[in-house]
Image: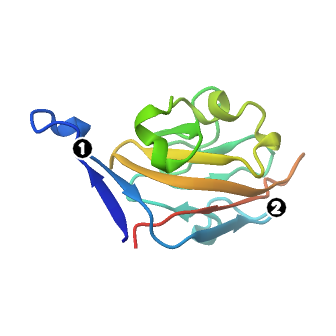
Amino acid sequence: MCFTLISCSDEDPEMDFRIWTGPKVQFVKEAGANPEDEINQDRISSSVWMTRGNKGGQIFNILAEESATKEISPLKTRWALGDVSDVQTLTFSSFRAAVGSPKSVVGKDLVLHLEDENVYLSVKFTRWDEGQGGGFGYERSSSN
């Protein structure tokens, strides 16, 4: 199965969402790699292209913002600690609010909400380089 469609109410189409459960996708941006190059962006959807700047900091959506803003990046996403199977009971917030310090995110089970598409997927960071360079990596579920 590639995704699950959840319909919470026939009267409220905003409550309909998809959960991506397709094969895992591995993404890595090496330290020092140009975040403006397509190969250094995880183009998850038509509205979210995830990367990280080379001055450190957190991840951001290069399609919607020029660099990371601590309190709100990545734009057009919401995050929660937990498992995608519990999506209806999780509390979603900005990346920083959900994970605390990004350097401690490695190994945690996260759920990413792509707001424009109303899609939820699982994410687990496998790498977070400290200091300058902006290296990071994760695995995530896909749509197919």
Residue found at x 85% / y 53% = 129
Residue found at x 24% / y 37% = 15
Residue found at x 81% / y 46% = 55
Cα separation, mark 2 vs mark 1, equals 40 Å
Asked whether residue 70 appears in the rendered view, the answer is no
Instruction: Give the quadrant of residue 140.
Output: bottom right
Question: In the rendering, at what x and y percent does residue 58 appear?
Answer: 71, 41
Question: In the rendering, at what x and y percent does residue 96 appear?
Answer: 67, 32
Q: Secondary structure at mark 1?
A: loop
Type of amino acid at the residue the image marks with label 2: Gly
- Name the disc covering residue 32, or none: 2
Q: Label 2 crowding class (10 Å Cα cut-off): few <14, some 14-19, many 20+?
A: some
Q: Label 1 crowding class (10 Å Cα cut-off): few <14, some 14-19, many 20+?
A: some
Question: In the rendering, at what x and y percent does residue 27 appear?
Answer: 65, 67
Type of amino acid at the residue the image marks with label 1: Asp
Q: Which residue is mark 1?
A: 16
Asked whether residue 46 appears in the rendered view, the answer is yes
- In this rendering, would 43 be left or right of 1? right
**Residue 62 higher or lower than 42, as above or below:** above
Question: In the rendering, at what x and y percent does residue 107 appear?
Answer: 76, 52
Query: In the image, which is nearer the foreground, mark 2 or mark 1?
Result: 1
